[in-house]
Image (cartoon, helix red, strand yellow):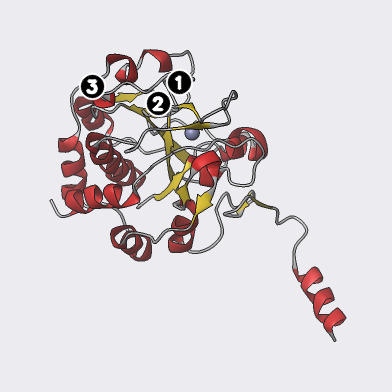
Amino acid sequence: MKRFAALTLLLAAPASAELIGGCQFDRDTLTFAGSPVEQATCLLRKVELMGKKAPQPLPPVIKRLMERGGAPSEAQEAAAIAAFPQPYRIYAIGYQDLATSQTEAGVPLLYFVIHDTSTPFYGADRFPKHLDNDPKVNSFESYLAAEPVAHIFLNRQGQIWGAHDFSIPWRATKLESRVVGPTARGRFVHIETVQPRRFLPGATNRGQTYGPKPGFSPAQYRMLAALYVYASARAGRWLIPAFHSTVDDGIPDAHDDPQNFDLKRFASELEKLLSA
Ligand SMILES: [Zn+2]
């Protein structure tokens, strides 16, 4: 009887359904497993040292958005834009009506991925004392490149550099670049949030580092919430928030960012914006 049940199960599983990583990304549908609430719960697990993941409760505001679906109201989008500093605010108004990315097969944007830059890297040196005002920590210079790695760079003062517009399909995870490949581009937008790193005691390789505590500034949580509302408004639906490390969970040599991310702080900034 047992053997029969196992056989039935085997036959029921289609051979093409390959699920990738801890949150089970389906390369055919380009979606993680489960309902939006289940996906957000998996993708917002706390990222600890060396990329270890720990479950944490989904804040009520995020749970509500994932359950109800829909999109930000015009007033909520306006509140998000009003929260942006210049010059990004003017840019955001200019691009407000432009649709967000989709994949080459026409699958629309769904995931809002939060990263930490892990830059500047201090090696065995101490972190600067006043991270939020440190010119080197908050400079965008080291991220300037012919092909910047993410859509957005957000420093500790809350300044925003829009490197690629949200309409541009772009990749910043191993899931997109190494595992699924170009067909996944456009399904994710990426926010690089400035946080320095240094070696763990005794470490000599970049896979063994830690970030400061608190990990991010109040201005960064405020702007992450505003960017989330703004990107969701342009996408016409509440995007599913995620972390880099949980998106790449189970993929070898995956990054361990963002470190020391306080999900409750993000949720409370989001709550403030939505009730504005
Ligand atoms: Zn990252």
Image location of residue 267, percent across then percent down: 28, 52
From what the image shows, is residue 22 above or below residue 125? below
Give the CA separation, mark 2 to mark 1: 6 Å
Q: Residue at x 32, y 43 (%)?
A: 228
Which callout, 3 or 1, points at the residue further toward the start of the chain? 1
User: How packed is label 2: few (under 14 Cα within 10 Å), some, or many (20 or more)?
Assistant: many
Verify CB contact (< 8 Å) between mark 2 and mark 1. Answer: yes
Regarding residue 187, the answer to whether it shows in the image is no
Mark 3: give few (<14), some (14-19) or many (20+) Cα within 10 Å.
Answer: few
**Who's the residue at 25% across and 26% down the image?**
132
> Judging from the image, what secondary structure is the residue with disc 3 in?
helix
Name which residue type carries label 3.
Asn
For image coordinates 75% across by 66% down, the residue present is 13
Residue nearest the observer in this picture, 130 or 268: 130
Which residue position is annotated with label 1?
Answer: 121
Residue 91 visible at all: yes
Q: Residue furthest left?
A: 276
Residue 106 image point, x, y percent? 52, 43
Q: Is mark 1 within 8 Å of ligand 1?
A: no
The kind of residue on which mark 1 rests is Phe
Read off the residue under disc 2: 196
Q: Quadrant of the N terminus?
A: bottom right
**Disc 2 beta carbon < 8 A from ligand 1?**
no
Picture quadrant of residue 16: bottom right
Question: In the rendered structure, which disc, 3 or 2, sits on the residue that comes first in sequence?
Answer: 3
